[in-house]
């Protein structure tokens, strides 16, 4: 929403928040979070396509050991990684508090737990099967690296850490790429179509390290999530859906790798 002299009306007048300030704020938030991940992912993708051999013969590794052979130190690094990755979410919560609402402004609260859970579960069920099929096709077509969702040691904390990692990914991405970004772009006067494109391309960009398939698949998922957010006005269901998708990918891979023939793997 706009006000006189470029001031944004969602903020108390004494704060003097203008559209220029919001533009700078958005750039800072993205530079400290998923915007930087997008640049990193692009560099990794360039490295992969210029490497001898096909993309499917290379691995995109997630949830790897930080201290091989030292399980307690490894656990400390894993927990530190999860906590530090959520720092941008804390920053966004603080920035949204200036409007007097905090994360409630984007529907990330405990006011509607059961509808959020139900909707998120349905979304995960629909996207999960389609996403897996798309990934398998992308691998066979040579458009994607082989994704290794986890390669943690077989210790007692392996599965709890994988679940925490899934939750961290979900909260970080849905709060920033959907809730926060769309709210700020709306306040800056962007059209719904332009905001959808920006959010979707951003989501695809930081998955480019997986290959073209990872970019396109996540961009389509991003568009669906934006449309659902516009309909529901809440990121809660999206966080639930994303968490379930990542838990299924991380834990499912750990349980099935080497036991089924259809799951692409690499000896790394």
Image: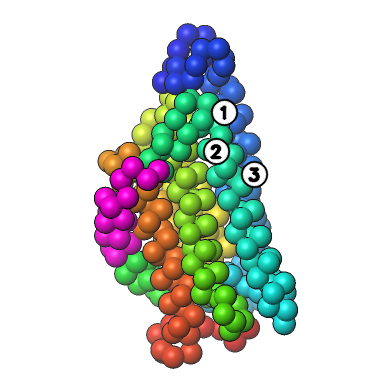
Residue numbers of the magenta segment: 109-126
Frontmost residue, 132 versus 241: 241
Marked residue nearer the N-terminal end (3 or 2): 3
Frontmost residue, 216 versus 20: 20
Res. 28 image quadrant:
top right
- Dot in front, 3 or 2: 2
Quadrant that contains the N terminus: top left
The secondary element bearing badge 2 is classed as helix
Marked residue nearer the N-terminal end (1 or 2): 1
Q: Which residue carries the number 3 mark? A: 32
- Judge from the rendering whether residue 2 lies leftward or rightward of residue 32; answer left or right: left
Frontmost residue, 162 versus 25: 162
Res. 60 image quadrant:
bottom right
- Disc ID at residue 23: 1
Marked residue nearer the N-terminal end (1 or 3): 1
Residue located 57% across and 80% down the image: 156
Residue located 43% across and 40% down the image: 179
Is residue 42 shown to the viewer in this render? no
Quadrant that contains the C terminus: bottom right
Frontmost residue, 142 versus 91: 91
- Disc ID at residue 92: 2
Label 1 with label 2: CB-CB less than 8 Å: no
Magenta stretch secondary structure, dominant:
helix
């Amino acid at each position: 929403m706009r006000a006189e002299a470029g001031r944004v009306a969602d903020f108390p007048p004494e704060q003097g928040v203008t559209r220029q300030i919001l533009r700078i704020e958005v750039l800072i938030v993205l530079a400290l979070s998923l915007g930087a991940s997008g640049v990193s992912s692009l560099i990794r993708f360039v490295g992969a396509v210029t490497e001898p051999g096909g993309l499917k013969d290379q691995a995109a590794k997630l949830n790897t050991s930080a201290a091989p052979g030292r399980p307690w130190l490894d656990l400390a690094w894993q927990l530190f990684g999860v906590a530090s990755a959520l720092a941008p979410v804390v920053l966004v919560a603080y920035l949204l508090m200036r409007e007097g609402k905090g994360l409630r402004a984007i529907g990330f609260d405990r006011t509607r737990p059961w509808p959020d859970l139900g909707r998120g579960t349905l979304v995960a069920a629909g996207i999960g099967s389609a996403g897996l099929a798309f990934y398998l096709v992308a691998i066979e077509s040579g458009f994607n690296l082989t994704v290794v969702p986890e390669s943690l040691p077989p210790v007692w904390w392996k599965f709890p850490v994988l679940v925490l990692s899934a939750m961290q990914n979900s909260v970080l991405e849905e709060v920033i790429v959907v809730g926060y970004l769309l709210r700020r772009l709306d306040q800056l006067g962007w059209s719904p179509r332009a905001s959808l494109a920006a959010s979707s391309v951003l989501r695809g960009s930081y998955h480019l390290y997986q290959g073209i398939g990872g970019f396109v698949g996540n961009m389509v998922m991003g568009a669906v999530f934006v449309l659902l957010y516009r309909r529901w006005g809440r990121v809660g269901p999206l966080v639930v859906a994303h968490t379930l998708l990542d838990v299924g990918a991380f834990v499912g891979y750990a349980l099935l790798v080497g036991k089924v023939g259809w799951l692409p793997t690499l000896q790394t």
